[in-house]
Each structure stands twice: as C-alpha cells, then as structure tokens.
Image (cartoon, helix red, strand yellow):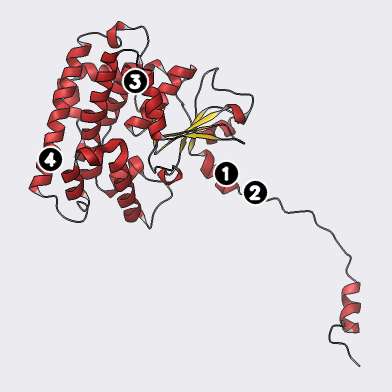
Amino acid sequence: MLNILQIPAPVKSFFDKFPIETYGPVEKRDDALAHEINSRIYNFEGSNALQKSANDTFKLGVYRVMQDSRSGRFLASDPWCLYAQLSLCKKSGLKLSSKCKVQEIKDSNPNSKHSVYEISSLAANERVLPVLIEGSSKRHVRSAAGIYEILNSRLTTAEELMYSLLLDSVVYDCYTSKVLYQLNFSEFLNLYGDRSSTAVDRLVCHTLREDLSKRNNFALRHRELVARGRYSQLFKRSDNMLQLIARVEENCRQTLTQFQALLGTTTGFYQDNSEPSYLDLKLASYIYCLLTLPESASMAEFLRQECSVLVVHSQKVISYYQ
C-alpha cells in the first residue's frame, strides 16, 4: 500500500543527485537604516568629546539641527534645545559640531563621542524636547523639565535668576506664539518636524503644536490664545487672535530693549566676564532662534536695527564654541 508521506522513488532519485550544501547565517544588517540614523547625529568636537566607551557618552535629543551660515556649525533650531547644547559645551569643554556622523564615517573617524541627536518628540515621556540620554547599555534619560531645573541651579546670583525667568516667560512666549501661530505647515515642520514624515504631515504638525504649547506652561499663561489658535491653520486667524499675538510681541520687544541696555556697549559677555555665563548662553539662544525664524514670523529687522548689541552678543557666544 502506498504511503502518502513517502517520497516517490523517481523524485527521490532526482534530488539525490544534487550535492548537499550548508549555508551560513545571513547577516542582519540594514545599511540604509544605519545611514539614516547616522545622518541625524552631530558629534561634539574638541579633545573632551572623544570617550573610551559608548557608556561614557551622552546624546542630547533635539527637534532639528540647522547649519549656521556664519560659523558653519550645526545648531539646534529651538531655543531651549540650543541653550542645552551650548550649556553642554560650557560644562564639558566641548566645541560645536561642524559635520554630521555620516561624514565622520566617510573620514574613517567613527569613534564614541558626545553628540546631538535629532529625534522625534514622541520619544520623550513628556513629548517635548530636549532630552539628555546618558550612557548606552545602561541609559539614564533626563527630561526637558529636568534639564531646565539643573541649568537654573547653575545661575550664580538672584539677579541672574531674575533675568533668566524673564527670558523664559516674556521672550519664550513671543517665540512660541510665532512658531505656533504664524508659521505655515512646511515652515513649522522644518523647525520641529521629523524628516521622515510625509503623508501624515498635517496630523504630525497638529500633534507637535499641541505638545509644544504645553511646554514651559505656555498654554497656562495664554489660555485664550491657545484656544483660538488650535485651528488657526484651518481657518483664517481672527482679529482678536492677531491682537493677542501682537501684545505678546510688544512685551517681548520692550524686554529685549531692556536687555540691550543691560549689556550696554560692551563687546564682551554679561558683566564683562572672560567667558560666557549660563545667562549669556540663554540670551544668545533666544536671539539666535528669533533671528532665524522664517520671514512670515521674523523679528530680524527689529533685532538688527533696535537691538544690534544683542545680535553681536549672540554671534560672539556661538563663535566662542567653534
């Protein structure tokens, strides 16, 4: 009786003539993914940037990184992220990056270094950036609020703390209102969006705006503006909303004029220090990001005409870490 599990003799005879070969495992390597990841990493430079092990390094997670046309260095596009980036340079004796990791690999220099990393804000528990990721096999992640608290603790005097809080309220609110309600989808995503998002750009943009409006309690200080601006990209902005934004900007202009007077005609840093203080870093971060906003929300003309000392100060701080 024929067994249905038995191989027919002609078939068995045919395959017995083929030699048996054993092949090794296929390497699980995705070069395209590795290239995409490395294109988002910008290593700090300087002798202190190189570490013996990846476990001794840190990565600063930011929204986007842009190349500064003046210095050629790669800087975070958001003021809080840029402040954290400059603060790490100051604390650890680092220099700003002049190229992304892809270029370093081409130059045969793929060592373990401290770095800035473009990531999605959804990777953070609070869904806002920056975040600081310390270590590799064992990681410790500091949130945006945690970073903010640590950096505030490094302000040495009550006067510096007062000025810092002024920047983080009046100037921060002006920058955030412009980013949330005066930029179109494309402009906003160039500053805060994930490079890989395409088909779902509008949904991503709406989510990012919602999350960003909650950072630093912006939504609590400007409830009416946030409520009116939630659908500003779908409908024409009302006169009341435009008036609210104009009021925030006017307060910012007055505050920046006061900081201009604070620095006076000095060509150095705050209180004529030989190197930038943390207050210098914060002020420079806000000025730089306000200067680089797209034309639809730009304050560049006001800053260059009315606050030229602040512009020069911002350039000097960035140049210090070249």
Mark 3 or 1, which is nearer the eye? 3
Q: What residue did someone put label 2 on? A: 29
- Look at label 4 and name its amino acid: Leu
Mark 4 or 3, which is nearer the eye? 4
Q: What residue did someone put label 4 on? A: 244
- Look at label 3 and name its amino acid: Leu
The residue located at (45%, 23%) in the rendering is 88
Q: Is residue 103 left or right of residue 318?
A: right
Task: Tell me which numbered mark, 3 or 1, is placed earlier along the sequence.
Answer: 1
Disc 3 secondary structure class: helix
Quadrant location of the N terminus? bottom right
Instruction: Say which quarter of the image contains residue 67.
Output: top left
Task: Tell me which numbered mark, 2 or 3, is placed earlier along the sequence.
Answer: 2
Mark 1 or 4, which is nearer the eye? 4
Q: Nearer the viewer, residue 198 or 162?
A: 162
The residue located at (40%, 51%) in the rendering is 197
Neighbor class of circle 1 (other Cα within 10 Å; few <14, some 14-19, many 20+) is few
Compared to residue 144, the image places residue 206 above or below, namely below
- Look at label 2 and name its amino acid: Arg
- x%, y% of residue 29? 65, 48
Q: What residue did someone put label 3 on? A: 281
Q: In this view, does 108 lie to the left or right of 38?
A: right
- Look at label 1 and name its amino acid: Ala
Quadrant location of the C terminus? top left
Q: What residue did someone put label 1 on? A: 34
Task: Tell me which numbered mark, 4 or 3, is placed earlier along the sequence.
Answer: 4
Disc 2 secondary structure class: loop
The residue located at (89%, 65%) in the rendering is 19
Disc 1 secondary structure class: helix
Q: Distance between the residues labelled 2 and 3?
A: 41 Å
Compared to residue 78, the image places residue 231 above or below, namely below
